[in-house]
Amino acid sequence: MNVLPSPLHLIGRARDAIDVFAIGRVFSMALSPTETGFSPKDYDVDPHTGFFPPEPLPALPSRFSIWENSLKEAQEVLFLSENKSERALAKQTVGEQWRAGVRSWPVLDTSVLNDNIRYLQKAHMVLAFILHFYAHSIPVKEGESIRIPRSIAVPLVAVSYELGIAPVLTFADTVLWNWELIDASKPLEVENIRYVNLLSGSETERAFYTVSAAVELKGVEMLQMIESFMNLPNVTDSTSTVKINRDLVQLKVVVDELTDIFNSVRDSVDPTEFYWKCRPWWTGGSSATPNGQPKWIFEGVPDYAKLDLAGPSAGQSTVMHALDVFLDVDHKLQHHHRTPAPSDNNKKADTGFMERMRRYMPGPHRVYLQRIGAVSCSVRECARITPSLKEPYNAVVAALKRLRDFHIRIACIYVITKTNSTPPPDCGIDLDQGKPSEDYGRGTGGNHVSSLLKAGRDATHRTILAPDA
């Protein structure tokens, strides 16, 4: 087997390898921290496009064209395995030919890509989309594992190691890397990008990615304020206090605008299509089958059962994590003095979800979050000890809490109320044969939607400083 020269002894310790990605290759790819202060560029964060690369990802070198060509073909011939519509049944033979072709590929050596972060990102995106196309289109009996061919599994794990990201489809693959410019002479703006790769082939999926992009690009303004705070020589002097006050007032405006963007999802994303046509494709392979076997078996990869394979989730958006870290929102319930005390439901929720979702981010972005969370005096602490900052700080947190209230309502519309709905006829899903998967009622990262979002909302509310703090 043409195994890649990446350190496979680390990949063999898959979970350990993934957890240490951020302190390995990511710093040798272009991340030499500045000596003069905090610079987001050190973490592959662009000053104008944030966590988006500043330009569309390039085509891979010609030796990898088999991957890119196959991804294009998949979008024409593959359907969800549960889809028994006339159109899907007519494509079954060509779909199996596609999967047989993937199984016949050689295991390509990706080490030639290791010195170019954009090539690595493109390889990850292409392979991760192929992974989900393969896993969700192949017919399997209930309770059986799905074997992912080594032609996909081995190079995907290898490029994931280099990038410090989970070897599965992620938010970065679907939103940050999966676009082209409509007009190449104009800059990267939400009105000037078109999403290229779609699993469901529906405009609902494309619209969902576009709304997510609008959130990311609006968030660039927040990142600029965070950078400004990080580079203040003294956060408690009068000049700095005036600057922080002004930025907090503007940050509240930005968070309100993010809520408006969230609200716009109802104008372009159809709830029924989203639930039945799009979400099943995003489901990952992290759960186990009834017999205790992993849902997805990565051939040629040691300790594959320890890989992070939950699939893409909005919870993997680094820009929203950055806002939480900056404001010091306690999702893990570690600050026991904050009020009101967590409810029983809060305590039962997955308090480690947000931290776990960081493993699905590119390694440099994860290190960025660690860096802004390691300040000696957080903006919350500045507001606690500086009376003039308490009101604008609390206003930002209250705005974020309102955003999360709205997120819960959106989740009700798009997920919770749809769990007992009837799929549209063109989905080809026969409920008489049983619901395709319990994952339909979960978030795309595998979590229980309602309890998780409410816990996040309540953690945000507890971040507000009491008048006597």
Image (tube, helix red, strand yellow):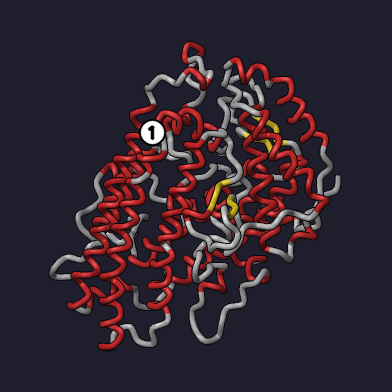
Q: Tell me the quarter of the picture where residue 448 sits.
A: top left
User: Residue 164: x percent and y percent?
Assistant: 62, 58
Q: Residue at x 58, y 39 (%)?
A: 198
Report which residue position mark 1 lands on.
Answer: 415
The amino acid type, in three-letter code, at marker 1 is Val
Image: 207 above or below 251: above
Looking at the image, can residue 52 be seen? yes
* 450 on left or right of 48: left
User: Residue 342: x percent and y percent?
Assistant: 25, 50
Camera-nearest residue between 178 and 357: 178
| View extreme (top): residue | 432
* 214 on left or right of 66: left
Callout 1 crowding tier (Cα within 10 Å): few <14, some 14–19, many ≥20: many
User: Residue 334: x percent and y percent?
Assistant: 34, 59
Report the label total: 1
* 464 on left or right of 54: left
- The quadrant of the image that shows the N terminus is top right
Looking at the image, can residue 347 be seen? no
Label 1: which secondary element: loop
Q: Residue at x 35, y 32 (%)?
A: 416
